[in-house]
Amino acid sequence: MESSQTKKFQARKKRSLRVRKHLRGNGDKPRLCVVKTGAHLYVQLIDDEKAITLASVSTLSKEYQDTDYNRKNKESGKQLGLKIASLAKQKNVNAVIFDRGRSKYHGVIASVADGAREGGLQL
């Protein structure tokens, strides 16, 4: 019999793959991947064709360490969205494919998307 932890891990993996199997980023329109853990948020721009990360920012970044944005909350999510939008503009990226992973488009994940839209990215 499988443990409940193993079943939970497998269910999370299936949800991630179900969402991500339709999403592919390229140089013109990279994938904006949002990962949330128990305490932090990570946001990356990924070019799947070349398998490289174009830009990344998280609540663990040095610029957010001594601020109110060093934990996972909606305000931090919005700030990370604005920051990744400015990094994308430096790379001449105007449109992205939003990848929420296994999380619902709700709360912190939605605030990251709203911040990226305010920063000028087209999702």
Image (spheres, rainbow, N blue to C red):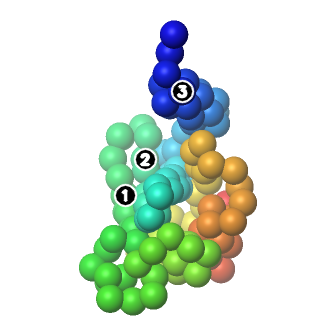
Q: Is residue 15 above or below residue 105?
A: above
How far apart marks 2 and 3 lie (CA) works out to 35 Å
In which quadrant of the rendered view does residue 70 lie?
Answer: bottom left
Mark 1 touches mark 2? (CB < 8 Å): yes
Q: Secondary structure at mark 2?
A: strand
Dot 1: within a 10 Å radius of its alpha carbon, few (fewer than 14), some, or many (20 or more) residues?
A: some
Q: Is residue 9 above or below residue 33?
A: above
* Residue type highlighted by circle 1: Leu
Mark 2 touches mark 3? (CB < 8 Å): no
Q: Residue at x 49, y 30 (%)?
A: 5
For this orientation, the residue located farthest to the top is 1
Q: Position of residue 63 (x, y in %)?
A: 32, 84
How far apart marks 1 and 3 lie (CA) works out to 37 Å
Q: Which residue is mark 2?
A: 47
Mark 2 or mark 1, which is nearer the start of the sequence? 2
Q: Residue at x 57, y 45 (%)?
A: 101
* Lateral position of residue 2 relative to residue 108, left or right: left
Q: Position of residue 69 (x, y in %)?
A: 45, 82
Residue 89 visible to the viewer: no
* Residue type highlighted by circle 3: Ser
Mark 3 or mark 1, which is nearer the start of the sequence? 3
* Lateral position of residue 25 relative to residue 59, left or right: right
Q: Which residue is mark 3?
A: 4
Q: Which residue is mark 1?
A: 54
